[in-house]
Image: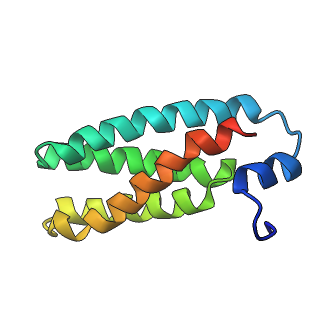
Amino acid sequence: MRPPGRSAAKWWSEVAPADGLDPVRRRFAEVTAERLALIEAYFDGERDAAALREIGRIAHMTAGVAATLGHAALGRVAGQVAVELHLANAGRDWRAVEPRMRQMMLAMRAVPVWCEAT
């Protein structure tokens, strides 16, 4: 557990195993930044069914990798977004998913900064 007052990045750099995953984590940070830019473009544009499917696809891919690389909160919220958007495309109102999408975007914004410190 991270001690109070210590940043997540600093703590992780001290406790992260030397497991050879640093290049993978850095690539994940790059891909996450690219995916975030796509989501923001879709989010700010017309939210048609195709855009929502693409955001759902991105959320699904992110959820599958994030927790493995130490981003449990991002993995969790991305998984929720993927499921909720699948339901939205099946007729549920996408606006109900918007708060969770914003949470995911916030978590995605933190990844590059967090990975740079490791």
Q: Residue at x 20, y 64 (%)?
A: 88
Residue that appears at 57% across and 62% down: 73
Q: Residue 72, position in %: x, y?
A: 62, 60
Residue 16, given in percent of the width and then of the height, sits at 84, 48
On the image, the x and y values in percent for residue 6 come to 77, 61
Q: Name the image quarter holding residue 35.
A: top left
Asked if residue 18 is positioned above or below residue 86 in the image, the reply reads above
Q: Residue at x 72, y 49 (%)?
A: 9
Looking at the image, which is closer to me, 84 or 34?
34
Location of residue 27 in the rendering, given as x and y in whole percent from the top left corner: 61, 30
Outermost residue, front side: 5
**Colouring style:** rainbow
80 or 115: nearer the viewer? 115
User: Which residue does the image show at 19% across and 45% down from the upper left?
Assistant: 44
Q: Is residue 91 left or right of residue 58?
A: left
Query: If the image is split into quadrants, where does the N terminus sit?
Result: bottom right
